[in-house]
């Protein structure tokens, strides 16, 4: 019996992870996206249970203490993000495999928890210089923020060999085909 529970995708900021996650959700009907929980308030038109499960910091801490998260992080004081275990069950009950888009440390925690029932994929830009170029081209971050993202990317790259597969996103069509092939093999 197939116990495949999750496909986990992580990448340094600017590596093209979101593009590949969107592609996988269109290309692979066996996958469904996991909704994360956060203690931050909703922004704009965000709705509870659609973009995130919005919890108070106290409720988030209560659920952490109860072991209800596969992984979680306090990004800064009182601002939590995490992956509810109930999401995997909700999607499994719907006959789907969970697709998770999380940071490197969250991805490794989930992989440790689920073992061979999860596929962990690390997406990377071909080089730090290319990553810098992409972050500059986005035009959304200050120079200081870009330098912070690059330093974090450099740190995250040290963990790439802990993943089941690494996709170098230098050519989008090739990266899409490669990630589809790796995920298809895992799900079959």
Image (cartoon, rainbow, N blue to C red):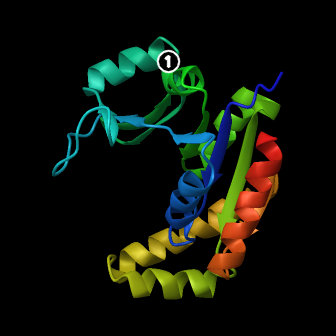
User: Residue 155 occupies which quadrant of the picture?
Assistant: bottom right
Label 1 crowd (10 A; few <14 / some 14-19 / many >=20): some
Q: Is residue 64 above or below residue 154?
A: above
* Quadrant of the drawing holding the N terminus: top right
Q: Is residue 43 above or below residue 117?
A: below
Q: Position of residue 16 (x, y in %)?
A: 55, 70
* Residue designated by label 1: 68
Question: Quick one: 147 or 171, which is closer to the camera?
Answer: 171
Q: Is residue 42 visible?
A: yes
Q: Residue at x 43, y 37 (%)?
A: 35
Question: Quick one: 129 or 45, which is closer to the camera?
Answer: 45
Q: Residue at x 34, y 83 (%)?
A: 139
Q: With 179 as the anchor, is 35 left or right in this view?
A: left
User: Residue 71 occupies which quadrant of the picture?
Assistant: top right
Question: Quick one: 65 or 87, which is closer to the camera?
Answer: 87
Q: Is residue 168 above or below residue 186?
A: below
Q: Position of residue 181 (x, y in %)?
A: 78, 59
Q: Position of residue 2 (x, y in %)?
A: 80, 26
Q: Residue furthest left?
A: 44
């Amino acid at each position: 019996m197939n116990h495949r529970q999750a496909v986990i995708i992580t990448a340094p900021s600017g590596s093209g992870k979101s593009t590949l996650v969107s592609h996988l959700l269109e290309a692979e009907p066996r996958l469904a996206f996991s909704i994360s929980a956060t203690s931050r308030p909703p922004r704009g038109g965000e709705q509870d249970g659609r973009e995130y499960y919005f919890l108070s910091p106290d409720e988030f801490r209560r659920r952490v203490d109860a072991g209800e998260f596969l992984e979680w992080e306090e990004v800064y004081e009182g601002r939590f993000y995490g992956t509810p275990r109930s999401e995997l069950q909700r999607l499994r009950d719907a006959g789907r495999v969970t697709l998770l888009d999380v940071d490197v440390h969250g991805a490794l925690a989930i992989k440790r928890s689920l073992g061979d029932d999860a596929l962990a994929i690390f997406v990377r830009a071909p080089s730090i210089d290319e990553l810098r170029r992409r972050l500059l081209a986005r035009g959304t971050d200050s120079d200081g923020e870009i330098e912070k993202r690059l330093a974090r990317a450099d740190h995250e790259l040290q963990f790439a060999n802990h993943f089941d597969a690494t996709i170098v996103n230098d050519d989008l069509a090739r990266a899409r085909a490669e990630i589809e092939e790796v995920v298809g093999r895992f799900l079959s």
